[in-house]
Amino acid sequence: MKILIKDSLKKLENVKLFVLDIDGTFSLSGKLFPGSIEFANTVLKANKKFVFLTNNSNKSIDDYLLEFKNAGLSINADQIFTAGIETAEYLIEKFGPKKIYLVGNKAIKQVFENIGHKVVDSEEPDIVVVTFDTTLNYEKLAKACNYVSKGKLFVLTNPDLNCPSKDGPIPDTGAIASIITKATGKEPDIIFGKPDPLILEMIMQKNNVKKEETCVIGDRLYTDILLGKRAGVLTILVLTGEAKESDIKNIKPDIIAQEIGEISKYI
């Protein structure tokens, strides 16, 4: 590992909660990286905790639980936080149940409905929510542009421009939203998920830990590492996903690891 910020290893010893990204950090396209199980077991043996925080809204918590189980890792539902679920809950808390025009897959539509919103297609919505969508087409984009241009609240579940896959990067929420912005001239009103520190503060509160007891581990500088920096917690960049060491300029992690298993010996 490479230490970029002084005393980071000492801070790592005091960590009680590790907040992990999934895609590009712990696994890729459902396949765990070689050191992932070792890391998870080491954390538990040290009487510490780990949770997952992902900006990927394409899967439900049950999907992730099954995916991890099939890969040999058993975890609980309260160890997984997704930007899609947190967005739906935030909108309920702030505005109450609303009519939502959702640019997204079936799984995230079900999430919004389960939480109390009404997902509409032909009805006039209150809010336009854009998220990761592998079924994206021109009709969806045109409707979203129409509603946004009329002044409907424009919300993103996350700002990611691309999503890692075994075949290479594919368009994510930020890339889809940029089309709507270009067409309408309107920027999103709310961008949830990483790197907004609100989502991390919610996780720390639920797990009863302080900032100095929390560490964010991820493969993206502008979401994972920036999240940790904004929240004031320890950050570790792993080089198994998007970012390369040469990319580090304005956003500087505390520690760099080649892969997540390398961190195990320092816990």
Image (cartoon, rainbow, N blue to C red):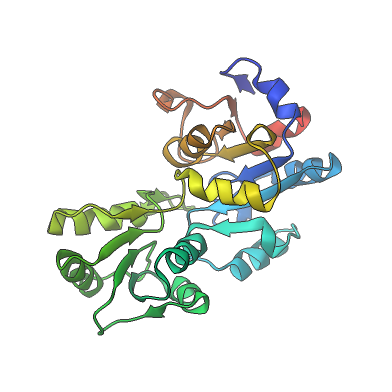
Whether residue 21 is visible to the viewer of this picture, yes or no, is: no
- In the displayed structure, would residue 76 be above or below residue 126? above
Looking at the picture, tell me which residue is in the foreground, 93 or 233: 93
The location of residue 192, given as percent across then percent down, is 42, 53
Q: In the rendered image, which quarter is residue 122 located in? A: bottom left
The location of residue 39, given as percent across then percent down, is 74, 41
The location of residue 59, given as percent across then percent down, is 52, 66
Q: Is residue 135 left or right of residue 264?
A: left
Residue farthest to the bottom?
Answer: 122
Q: Is residue 265 left or right of residue 226?
A: right
Whether residue 226 is visible to the viewer of this picture, yes or no, is: yes
Looking at the picture, tell me which residue is in the foreground, 174 or 163: 174
Question: For the C terminus, which image quadrant?
Answer: top right
- In the displayed structure, would residue 110 be above or below residue 212? below
Callout count: 0
Looking at the picture, tell me which residue is in the foreground, 219 or 126: 126
Instruction: Give the residue displayed 50% in from the left and 73% down from the top.
Output: 111
Q: Is residue 25 left or right of residue 209?
A: left
The location of residue 149, given as percent across then percent down, is 15, 65
- In the displayed structure, would residue 91 be above or below residue 229? below
Instruction: Give the residue displayed 45% in from the left and 61% down from the top.
Output: 87
Question: For the N terminus, which image quadrant?
Answer: top right
